[in-house]
Amino acid sequence: MAEPTHLTEIRASYDTVAESYAGLVGPAFENDLLGRSTMAAFAELVLAGGDRPVLDAGCGPGHVTAHLHTLGLDAFGVELSPVMVGVARRTHPGLRFDVGTMTALDLPDGGLGGVVAWYSTVHTPTEELPVAFREFHRVLAPGGHVLLGFHVGDEKRRKDQGYGHPMSLDLYLRPPELIAELATAAGLVLDATLLRDLQGPGAPQACLLLHRPGG
Ligand SMILES: C[S@@+](CC[C@H](N)C(=O)[O-])C[C@H]1O[C@@H](n2cnc3c(N)ncnc32)[C@H](O)[C@@H]1O
């Protein structure tokens, strides 16, 4: 079966920008204290349930995976762009990074303590999000946790450049209520919603914490 167009576009775009993305977004993440605090809360929730591995889905150059590792989590990354995976492996040689898609994870059922998707679902068409959320539910152990970070709004933007390079892909801004509804329909339970960056020129952002029931 032919690959969906959006996956081809995401891979090509992030292959192109991988090096410059790592140089810009990695250091910026150092200053994202609210994002890092949310990950600290996520880590505490995961560790309270045991020491199962944690997936960083759409990990890009791996700085979030590495940060999760410093929080005591056995974190590994899965990423669509092979060039991004190359950057991640080079930058964080002690960590595991695999090429793959969050919509068809090459992982067994029920083995993970947590899944993070930090601004990595923002290029996935809304009708495809349930596929990713069902995958997150499938690979999580009962009681496992999910952390989603994404742009808030209600529009699709065409992105034709970024990080100093041409890109060609869609960027979705979505209401947190819609993301919560789709994740809940996939079997996850919503624990908390954080709305942030409500002032200023950019789009607001949201973090959702959810869990797979049971356990
Ligand atoms: C905006 S970047 C975020 C990267 C990283 N999570 C971060 O916080 O910097 C989006 C990333 O998600 C990846 N991505 C998008 N869709 C994906 C999918 N279906 N499976 C795996 N990775 C995906 C892209 O290749 C890209 O590296």
Image (cartoon, rainbow, N blue to C red):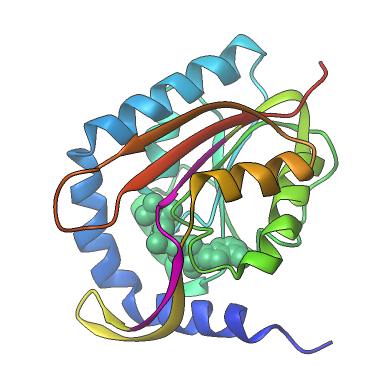
Compared to residue 42, the image places residue 13 above or below, namely below
Q: Magenta: predominant secondary structure element? A: strand
Q: Is residue 18 left or right of residue 163?
A: right
Percent x, y of residue 119: 44, 54
Percent x, y of residue 25: 25, 56
Residue sitting at x 76%, y 50%: 135
Percent x, y of residue 179: 59, 48
Observer-nearest of 109 and 90: 109
Count all numbered tags in the image, as a single digit: 0
Q: Is residue 129 left or right of residue 110?
A: left
State whether residue 117 appears in this view: no
Q: Pick out the residue farthest to the left.
A: 200
Residue 92: within the magenta? no
Quadrant containing the C terminus in the rendered view: top right
Residue sitting at x 69%, y 67%: 127
Q: Is residue 182 left or right of residue 15?
A: right
Residue sitting at x 71%, y 62%: 103
Residue 149: within the magenta? yes
Compared to residue 99, the image places residue 147 above or below, namely above
Observer-nearest of 119 and 16: 119
Quadrant containing the N terminus in the rendered view: bottom right
Q: Is residue 34 left or right of residue 96?
A: left
Percent x, y of residue 213: 78, 23
What span is colored magenta in the figure? 147-159
Q: Name which quarter of the figure residue 132 lies in.
A: bottom right
